[in-house]
Each structure stands twice: as C-alpha cells, then as structure tokens.
Image (tube, rainbow, N blue to C red):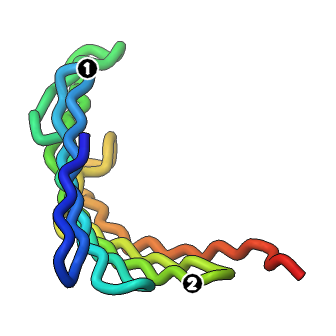
C-alpha cells in the first residue's frame, strides 16, 4: 500500500501487517538522486517461549532511518538504528547497528 503526493519532493508511506505484527515506513525523495526514509518495525511487542524452559525471546519495536544516493550506474545507502535491541541470550548486552552498502551495475555502451 502506498500513498504518494508530488510537489517539490515525493513522499511515500508503506504499511505491513502480517503474522500479528505491524511495520510502517515513510520515504521522501528529495531530488532526482537523494532519498531519505524512516521505518518503525515490530510495533506490537511479543514474547515467545523457547524450547528451553524459562528462556523467552522478546520482539520489541525498532526504529531505523536511512539515506540513499542513486544515479545512472550506482546506488549507495546508509541506515542507522535509532533504537537499541537486546541480544538474545547475552544478558544485558544490547546492539545498535549502522549499515552501509553500495551497488553497481554495468552501463550500456
């Protein structure tokens, strides 16, 4: 599902409802090359009992933002977790990631 309105920027919203969970995201295309976005996933917290008695896997909401640059021959993206997440089975240890990637494709001669 997407809603788009055109002005000086393009704006899109996506909503995903599956298996008892809700994710929502929005992106803004700033110009021909730059896009920024924000995603909130796992909006419904859940506890799942594991096969080992007394150990529970918790799913909690996560918020991530990102920026991407796209041109005729490559795309580069950077995503940053704005919230931290408990590491399963690691006590009080948490994780929070910064992810980056670049993709290239062959140009036509």
CA–CA distance in space, label 1 to label 2: 36 Å
In front of the other: label 1 or label 2? 2
Residue 35 in the image, given as x and y percentages of width and height: 34, 77
**Front-most of residues 65 and 107:** 107
**Front-most of residues 105 and 3:** 3
Residue drawn at the location 31% of the way across and 19% of the way down: 50
Do the residues bearing badges 1 and 2 touch, measured as CB atoms within 8 Å? no
* Image quadrant occupied by the N terminus: top left
Q: Residue furthest right?
A: 109
* Within-10-Å neighbours for mark 1: few <14, some 14–19, many 20+: few
Q: Residue furthest left?
A: 44
Q: Secondary structure at mark 1?
A: loop
Q: What numbered label is drawn on residue 3? A: none
Q: Secondary structure at mark 2?
A: loop
Is residue 92 among the parts visible in the rendering? Answer: no
Residue 47 in the image, given as x and y percentages of width and height: 16, 26
Residue drawn at the location 20% of the way across and 41% of the way down: 15
* Image quadrant occupied by the C terminus: bottom right
Residue drawn at the location 21% of the way across and 47% of the way down: 41
Q: Quadrant of residue 27?
A: bottom left
Sequence-wise, which precedes: disc 1 or disc 2? 1
Is residue 83 among the parts visible in the rendering? Answer: yes
On screen, residue 91 above or below 49: below
Residue 9 in the image, given as x and y percentages of width and height: 22, 79
The residue pinned by badge 2 equals: 71
Q: Is residue 88 left or right of residue 38?
A: right
The residue pinned by badge 1 equals: 19
Q: Quadrant of residue 17?
A: top left
Residue drawn at the location 36% of the way across and 72% of the way down: 79
* Within-10-Å neighbours for mark 2: few <14, some 14–19, many 20+: few
Q: Quadrant of residue 72?
A: bottom right
């Amino acid at each position: 599902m997407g809603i788009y309105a055109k002005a000086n920027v393009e704006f899109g919203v996506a909503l995903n409802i599956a298996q008892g969970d809700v994710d929502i995201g929005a992106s803004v295309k700033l110009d021909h090359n730059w896009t920024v976005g924000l995603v909130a996933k796992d909006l419904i917290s859940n506890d799942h009992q594991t096969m080992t008695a007394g150990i529970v896997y918790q799913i909690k909401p996560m918020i991530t933002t990102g920026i991407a640059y796209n041109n005729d021959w490559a795309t580069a993206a950077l995503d940053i977790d704005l919230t931290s997440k408990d590491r399963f089975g690691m006590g009080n240890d948490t994780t929070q990631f910064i992810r980056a990637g670049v993709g290239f494709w062959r140009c036509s001669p």
